[in-house]
Each structure stands twice: as structure tokens, then as C-alpha cells.
Image: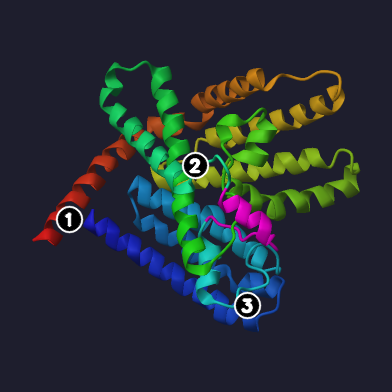
Amino acid sequence: MEEELKNFIKVWITTILCLCYCHYIVSRLIPKGLLRLISLLPVFYLFITTPLTLHSFHLCGLTIFFLVGLGIFKLLLFSFNLGPLSPPQPSLFHFISIACLPIKIKQNPNPKSTQKHRNPIGLPNKSIVVAVKALLLGLVIHSYEYRPHLHPYVILALYCCNMYLALDILLALCATPARALFGFELEPQSNEPYLSTSLQDFWGRRWNLMVTNILRPSVYDPIRRVSARVVGARWARMPAVMATFAASGLMHEVIYYYITRVQPTWEVTWFFVLHGLCVVVEVEVKKAVTGRWGLHPMVSRPLTLVFLAVTGNWLFFPQLIRNGVDTKAIGEYAIMVDFVKTNLLHLHR
């Protein structure tokens, strides 16, 4: 564990040095365009290779999500003076936070609406919500002790809950210091995905919105503009949606490689391609029946969640389960607890 933490610290020191180079040299001396993109290639190389020293599911998965899943896309946009890093932040700490954390600063926030948003009447404080979700995550982790006696569908439900709760807590923990230290007013990172009434609602408006906000300008918008010239504006959305989901699938395939260190099977890519196709069909069906027919949310919500669970069990989780990643992740929870207890005892002494 200690060796893994040392490697983790080395990776992030390298990351910070790379972002210092981006802030002080690239943004100030190199014009946007191809030349800036070329100047960022060494950074991309280090972002891709340094996490290979990590073997822990949580530390490696966290790092890959931040650096490869978000950081490289943000820097790609930055090379053309687009995205959340453009125009460059005046402060180095601001630049580093936005570059490698799953946050997006709200553009021109309304002070009155901000105040209302901070103190919504009748809604629990965000810290209380996070605490409740942390408690639920703890219960899910504890229930893994009874995994040999549980039905596979119950285990699938636990894995889905674990993924949602862990990601939601992680996003909240990343946003809290950005708000507290820098006073950032941030875009929402997630929007209660369990309330999704359709796949379009789930992927576009509720689940992991930081990835959505990166893929939209880096993949969806350019493909839609090009497609509009070829097939017309009416049909341009279809190839743009499919390309976006394919890019997300490939990104997850890369993450799976870092976590499992085995040859890709492309199952998770097909998971996203399938969902992209379903979203395209769903959008066209909605257009055809708008105002004439629609499902009640009490019906569409469970249907959406069931479809996500069934396709996830078919294509999203198998590669992880086959390579023992689920067992490894569960074991790491116990290791982390023991590590914290041991170091707390040393501090008391």
C-alpha cells in the first residue's frame, strides 16, 4: 500500500509539472492551432504512461478518469483555444484545478439565482446528502461479505449502486475544495440519474455531466457540423451521437485496460455503441409521436433503469468480473480501512 501511494504521489507531481508547463509556456508563448497541439504531445504521453505504475483499482481508476478521461480532452480543446481552459485562467491553481478535476465553472452566474441555489427551501444541505450517500455506500460495501449467498441479480444491483454512489461522492469531494478555496460557482456534476425517464435523459442530462460537457465540444459538435454538410441538418445529429458514444466507449476501453492489464475485448465499446444507437432511435420515435403519445414517468423510469442494468450486465461489467476487478476493488476497501487505522494509531502515539 505504501509503495502504491508513493507511485500515486509521483504521478500527480508529474501531472502538476506538466500543467505548469501548459500554463506558463504553452498558453503564453505558443499560438492556438496545430503548433500548440504538437507542443502538448509530451504532456499527453506522460498522462498516458505514468499511470501504468499504479495497480490499485481505486488509485489507478481515479487517476485515469482524471487524466485520460478528462484531462487529455480538455487539453485537446485548449490547443485550439476552446473548452473550459480557454481563455487561460490567470491563476496557476485555477488552471490546474480545472484541467485535472471533474469540474466546470459556471459562466456568468446570476448572484440571485446562485444564492437561491445555495439555500433551497425544503431541500437538505449538500453535505448532508453526501453523508447519507457515504453511509449507503458503506452499507453496500458491508453487504459484500454475504456475496456468496446472494442472487446474481442482487449482486448486479449492488454493483450498480456502488458505482453510482462512489462516483457521486467522488465528484462532490472534488467540487468542495474548488468552491471553498477559489470561490468557483460550478456547473452540476450529476443530476440524480436514478430519476431518468429515458436513455437520452440519462446520458445527456443526468449521468456524469462532466464527461458529457467535454465530449459535446470535442466530439459531438465537430461531427455534427461536418455531417450537416454531407447529409443535411435534419440527419446530422445521428452520426454525431454515434461518434460521441463510440468515443466514450473507446475511452472506457482504455480505462479498462489500465485496470485489468489484459487485451481489450471491446465489450464495453459495444455497450456504448448500443446505447448510442438506442438514443438515436429514441429521439426519432419521440419526434414522431410528440403530442400524441408518451409514457408516464412512473413507467419510463423503471424501464430505463432496467434497460441500463440488463445491458450493463451483458456488456459493461463482464470484462471487470472476468478479470477479478470486482473482488480486487472489494478487497481494497478493507485494506484502506486497515491502513487508515494503523496510521491513526501511530499519530496518537
Q: Position of residue 183 (x, y in %)?
A: 54, 66
Q: Position of residue 328 (x, y in %)?
A: 31, 38
Outermost residue, left direction?
Answer: 349
What's under tag 3, amino acid-wise?
Ser
Quadrant location of residue 238? top right
Outermost residue, front direction?
Answer: 121
Q: Which residue is mark 1?
A: 344
* Vertical placement of residue 342 versus 23, above or below: above
Which SS class for mark 2? loop
Q: Which residue is mark 3?
A: 27
Of residues 284 and 89, the one nearer the viewer is 89
Q: Are marks 2 and 3 in contact (CB under 8 Å)?
A: no
Which SS class for mark 3? helix
Q: Give the spatial CA distance, label 1 vs label 3.
A: 43 Å
**Dot 2, how many residues are within 10 Å of its Cα: few (below 14), some (14-19), or many (20+)?**
few
Q: Position of residue 102 (x, y in %)?
A: 53, 55
User: Residue 124: which disc?
Assistant: 2
Of residues 347 and 3, the one nearer the viewer is 347
What's under tag 1, amino acid-wise?
Leu
* Vertical placement of residue 65 versus 85, above or below: above
Which SS class for mark 1? helix
Q: Position of residue 163 (x, y in %)?
A: 45, 37
Q: Residue at x 65, y 51 (%)?
A: 213
Query: In the rendered picture of this protein, how many numbered marks are placed on residues?
Result: 3
Residue segment shown in magenta:
102-119
- Choose the circle earlier in sequence order: 1 or 2: 2
Q: Is residue 69 visible?
A: yes
Q: Give the spatial CA distance, label 2 vs label 3.
A: 41 Å
